């Protein structure tokens, strides 16, 4: 679908947005993501899916570009309901432009004529009913950047929460305090992709490193259950110095934040390097543990990284949750504690 035709179609699937403020000069500031786009009448935001028309902010509503039932470990959340099912849904568009994006078909649909998928009309009730039908414990806004479709996610999560279905975001973390306050009553789990520890690299992706770091700290302080993922890319962010920087930063917030170091595979516009070897993930995990992090996981290479897929008690070294890929082989956590030494294991169990 041509991007111009798709844009016209998506402009019909909207509702009035809530995440904005009016500035003195009649300019509308969108606060859904860290760009804080200043929208004069008739202008689109950087994401191209939030726009100002008729002196109102219009935002995506009433469709999905993908729905899938996943194990929660695929998000990945390792400290939230091991073995549970998560109904994942996504829309179109993004506020960043990562050359290695693994969901580029949806995230870059409005900026790349080679991308794009057909939106499917769905109501919030239909999505929640689907989650109930498949006995999903969690609903996850993912596949594109959920911050820029936050009003839609909250509409869905408001219906799901009274049914005991929790909301979760899989996000780049380029947030604002306003959007985090807006989603907090309805989002329990938050995964941030911490893509690099180099501001120059982040600026190439479309934001600033410091904004993401500030939001990681803010998300933790606000009481979301937070897990961090770093896609470790050869020759891009796999140096010891950069990995040490990420690990030290996370440890300074809390040594109990799970850090997932995952393997890259060539995709989208970054096909000039090999897949991340297991030894690189093992090295990254060692750096994380040496920085004081209690829970460091190596992902995307099932069975190739020893016990780095498992949750291990940091006090007595008992294996608590044994994994192979997305499968739970054993879960010994009892009432959020290690059964051996009774150490509290943080998470949502």
Image (spheres, grey):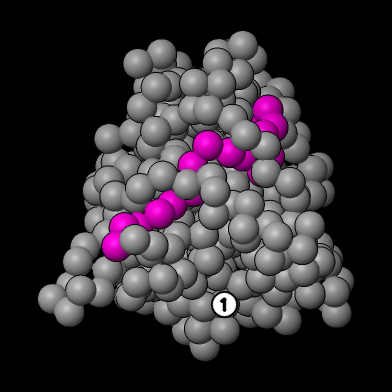
Label 1 SS? helix
Tell me residue 277's x, y (percent): 81, 64
Q: Residue at x 56, y 62 (%)?
A: 94
Name, please, the residue furthest toward the front.
Answer: 54
From the viewer's perspective, is 299 left or right of 123? Answer: right
Q: Is residue 52 magenta?
A: no
Q: Is residue 71 magenta?
A: yes
Quadrant in which the N terminus is drawn = bottom right
**Compared with residue 167, is residue 195 higher up or lower down, i.e. above or below?**
below
From the viewer's perspective, is 25 left or right of 66? Answer: left
**Compared with residue 60, is residue 122 higher up or lower down, i.e. above or below?**
above
Q: Nearer the viewer, residue 199 or 205?
A: 205
User: In which image quadrant can residue 210 be found?
Assistant: bottom left
Q: Which stretch is magenta?
A: 55-75
From the viewer's perspective, is 272 left or right of 220? Answer: right
Q: Nearer the viewer, residue 206 or 78?
A: 206
Tell me residue 136's x, y (percent): 57, 19
Q: Nearer the viewer, residue 67 or 71?
A: 67
Quadrant in which the C terminus is drawn = top left
Name, please, the residue furthest toward the left.
Answer: 24
Q: Residue at x 41, y 44 (%)?
A: 15
Q: Residues within 10 Å of mark 1 (few under 14, many from 20)?
A: some
Tell me residue 246's x, y (percent): 48, 69
Q: Residue at x 21, y 63 (%)?
A: 21
Tell me residue 310's x, y (percent): 63, 37
Residue at mark 1: 205
Name, please, the residue furthest toward the bottom.
Answer: 200
Q: Residue at x 62, y 60 (%)?
A: 7
**Compared with residue 117, is residue 249 higher up or lower down, i.e. above or below?**
below
- The reply to whether residue 268 is visible in this rendering is yes
The majority secondary structure of the magenta stretch comes to strand
- The reply to whether residue 209 is visible in this rendering is no
């Amino acid at each position: 679908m041509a991007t111009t035709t798709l844009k016209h179609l998506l402009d019909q699937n909207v509702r009035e947005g809530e995440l904005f403020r009016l500035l003195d000069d009649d300019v509308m500031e969108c606060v859904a993501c860290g760009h804080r786009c200043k929208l004069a009448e008739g202008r689109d935001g950087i994401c191209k899916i939030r726009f100002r028309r008729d002196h109102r902010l219009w935002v995506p509503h009433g469709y999905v570009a993908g729905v899938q039932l996943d194990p929660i470990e695929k998000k990945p959340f390792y400290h939230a309901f091991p073995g549970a099912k998560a109904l994942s849904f996504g829309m179109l568009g993004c506020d960043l432009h990562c050359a290695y994006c693994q969901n580029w078909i949806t995230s870059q649909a409005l900026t790349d004529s080679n991308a794009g998928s057909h939106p499917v009309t769905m109501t919030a009730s239909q999505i929640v009913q689907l989650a109930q039908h498949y006995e999903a414990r969690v609903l996850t806004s993912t596949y594109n950047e959920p911050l820029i479709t936050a009003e839609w996610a909250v509409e869905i999560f408001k219906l799901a929460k009274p049914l005991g279905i929790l909301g979760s975001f899989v996000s780049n973390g380029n947030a604002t305090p306003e959007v985090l306050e807006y989603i907090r009553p309805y989002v329990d789990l938050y995964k941030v992709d911490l893509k690099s520890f180099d501001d120059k690299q982040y600026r190439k992706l479309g934001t600033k490193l410091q904004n993401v770091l500030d939001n990681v700290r803010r998300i933790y302080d606000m009481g979301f259950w937070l897990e961090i993922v770093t896609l470790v890319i050869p020759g891009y962010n796999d140096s010891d110095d950069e990995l040490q920087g990420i690990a030290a930063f996370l440890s300074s917030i809390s040594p109990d934040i799970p850090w997932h170091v995952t393997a890259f595979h060539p995709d989208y516009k970054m096909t000039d390097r090999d897949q991340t070897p297991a030894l690189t993930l093992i090295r990254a995990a060692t750096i994380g543990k040496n920085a004081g992090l209690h829970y460091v996981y190596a992902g995307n290479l099932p069975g190739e990284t020893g016990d780095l897929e498992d949750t291990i008690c940091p006090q007595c070294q008992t294996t608590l949750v044994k994994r192979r890929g997305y499968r739970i082989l054993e879960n010994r956590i009892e009432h959020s504690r290690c059964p051996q030494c009774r150490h509290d294991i943080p998470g949502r169990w």
